[in-house]
Image (tube, helix red, strand yellow):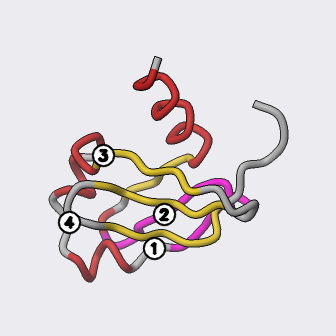
Amino acid sequence: MNGLIKGKEVHFDDEYLHVKLEDGRIISTPMKWYETLKNASISELKDYKFICMGTGIEWESIDYHLSIESMLELSLKDVA
């Protein structure tokens, strides 16, 4: 992929992880794809920060890292 895909906000619901990108797009992927996040508490999920110039997300308290580009690629692969 060309350019940096940078996150702006992270939201959750019972089924999906939603990441709003700086350009306004929203990527939504099933929480079941991320076992560690699925098993985390709401307070742990809310305790995230963007890393790597906004291209990744870190949940330090549960030692979990997620690349936004990988998240996008997985979501596109699931559609194909």
Amino acid type for the residue under numbered disc 3: Pro
Relative height, residue 34 to residue 53 (above, below): above
Which of the two labelled residues, at mark 4 and mark 3, occupies the earlier sequence position? 3
Using the image, tell me which numbered label, if any, was put on residue 30.
Answer: 3
Q: What is the spatial separation of the Cα atoms under label 4 and label 2, in whole angstroms? A: 13 Å
Q: Which residue: 56% across, 72% down?
A: 9
Q: Which corner quadrant of the image does residue 62 belong to?
A: bottom left
Question: Do tag 4 and tag 2 residues touch (Cβ < 8 Å)?
Answer: no
Q: Mark 4 points at which residue?
A: 40
Q: What is the spatial separation of the Cα atoms under label 4 and label 3, in whole angstroms? A: 14 Å
Q: Name the residue under label 2.
A: 58
**x then y, percent, for residue 29:** 38, 46
Q: What is the spatial separation of the Cα atoms under label 2 and label 3, in whole angstroms? A: 18 Å
In the visual, does 34 lie left or right of 52?
left
Q: Name the residue under label 1.
A: 48
Q: Nearer the viewer, residue 20 or 36?
A: 20
**Nearer the observer, disc 4 or disc 3?**
3
Stretch in magenta: 49-61
Amino acid type for the residue under numbered disc 1: Tyr
